[in-house]
Image: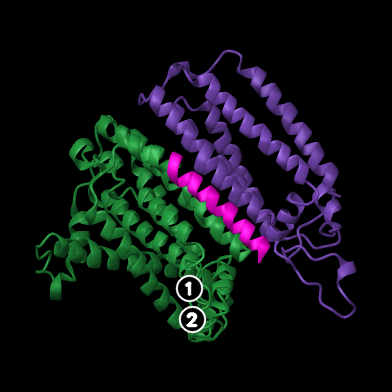
Chain colours: A green, B purple
Amino acid sequence: MTSAVLAFEMAYWQQSVLRSVGVLAAVLLPAGTIVYLFLFKMMSFMQSRLGPNEAGPYGSLQLLAEVGKWIQKEDIFPAKADRKLFAMAPYIVVASVLLVYVAVPFGPDAWFARLDTGIFYVLAVSSISAIGVLIAGWASANKYSLIGGLRAAGQLIAYELPMVLAVVGVVVQAGSLDLFEIVRMQAEGEIFGLSWFGNPFILTQMVGFVIFMIATQAELTQPPFDMPVAESELVTGYMTEYSGIRFLLFFIAEFASAGAFGIIAATLFLGGYWLPGLDMHADYMNVVGPLVLLGKMLFVTFIIFWVRFTYPRFREDQLQKFAWTLLIPLALVNILATMVLKVAF
Amino acid sequence: MTLLAAANGISLPGTDDPINVSQTVGFALLAALMIWAAIRVVTTRNVVHAAVWLVVVLAGAAAQFILLAAEFVGVTQVMVYIGAVIVLILFGVMLTQAKLGNDPNLSRRNWYGGAVVAVVLFGLLAFATIDTFEDAKLPEDRRMALPAAEVGDGEVPRTESNTGAVSDAVFGAYLLPLEVLGVLLTAALVGAIAVARKD
């Protein structure tokens, strides 16, 4: 990314520093956008209220005010908590999200790391956050936190599987785990003899897309799958005892991972950084590509948050039953159909 | 020759290559971290702490795989061990005995039996590794080259993704063992459910 945009050669360590800063920006910007657009403004609109409107024009600086507030707050440790693990847990969750962004293709040269195993790597590192959540729930020395952590882990395990299986359909169709290759196959593919808009996999993998989005909703522990943080019964579950900057980290991780899953869904199903009419290998794509991807991510996260603010909560047993008896068999049938059609055509 | 290389006709990284210094340094640092974490796994008096130290050991193993250009194996290590096995261990510990603080009954009296097994296992693995790879070093270009026979004269050998090489081996030469393993694991899963079910 950096070498192509700035058009001069840099030492390896300079590139690495720039890429690390780039990952931070790539995580924080979408997260901030999502919080302001959806959590503050869209939610208020759907609930017939104004939402934050004092800080800055249209309340756009509210988020900075909130961050300032959290940083000032006292960093409280419960008396019986396991201090080391309690302090560590939010960082594990945030690290998991940061690692997801590393593999995302933003443009032909705009990437942080180019991995052979692209999507497999993304699914692997996104599952690390379950450890952070479990540790947070246990180290808080609080029954509500423990129940929340257990619920979260059970849910993450149950919905990891349909998500992976939904992605397998895309991988079979693209013939590669590499995210760049998946984008290229969508840009250069054709469907029913039409090629001008490529072949975004949402057309052929509609079932996979729906399963992926449902699993995403569950992985993010958002309504209707928010039993782990159910505020009315568990007092926000594993986050109960956290305050100040550690709560802020959980908060950032929650919305950054919403952005991460939005970007991954956009890359897998909506054609990634490519749009019809653009040359996906051209240099200008290093600037346009990230913007296109951001737009697609906002579209996907809009759906995620629309569902979040609309549906009531499932029961715990309904959630497990839904994953194991409906989503997983459906995803397996989808893989089978994809493989048969792949061989047939 | 390793089995993978023998099956695909891919030659091992040459023994004439220069030593990759940064890789060796990285290996040493990761190995030291892993050994320290492994010692802490068995000496800590807190079950959850042991599980977290185990995460460090397994993550170190994943990093070692990536250092050896076995990216797919490294990611699988993260997916299976850190993402699933450790989560299940923590899940089990928290469901059964979620007490905080140290547990004095964690060490058993016959721990030295385990130590003997560990030393024997280390010897076997070390012998197998040294016997297989001898003086082979990791090349600077970490991607496997295609066999020389497929490359024409004057052509630069095309490199292929290592992930592709792994999948060719698994779904080619090792297809039958893979299928048998899959059936065995499924049978184990069904058996476990049958045993655990009360009704």
Q: Nearer the viewer, residue B90 or A189?
A: A189
Between the residue at mark 2 and the residue at mark 1, the CA separation in whole angstroms equals: 7 Å
Q: Which residue is mark 2?
A: A286
Kind of residue indicated by mark 1: Phe
Labels 2 and 1: the sequence-earlier one: 1
| Residue A184 falls in image quadrant | bottom right
Q: Nearer the viewer, residue A271 or B122?
A: A271
Kind of element beneath mark 2: helix
Residue drawn at (64%, 18%) of the image = B112
Residue drawn at (57%, 70%) of the image = A180
Residue A134 versus residue B192 in the image, above or below:
below
Do callouts 2 and 1 mark residues in contact (Cβ within 8 Å)?
A: yes
Residue A79 versus residue B144 in the image, above or below:
above
Asked if the stretch drawn in magenta spans residue A343, the answer is yes
| Residue A222 percent location from the top left of the image | 30, 50
Q: Which residue is mark 1?
A: A106
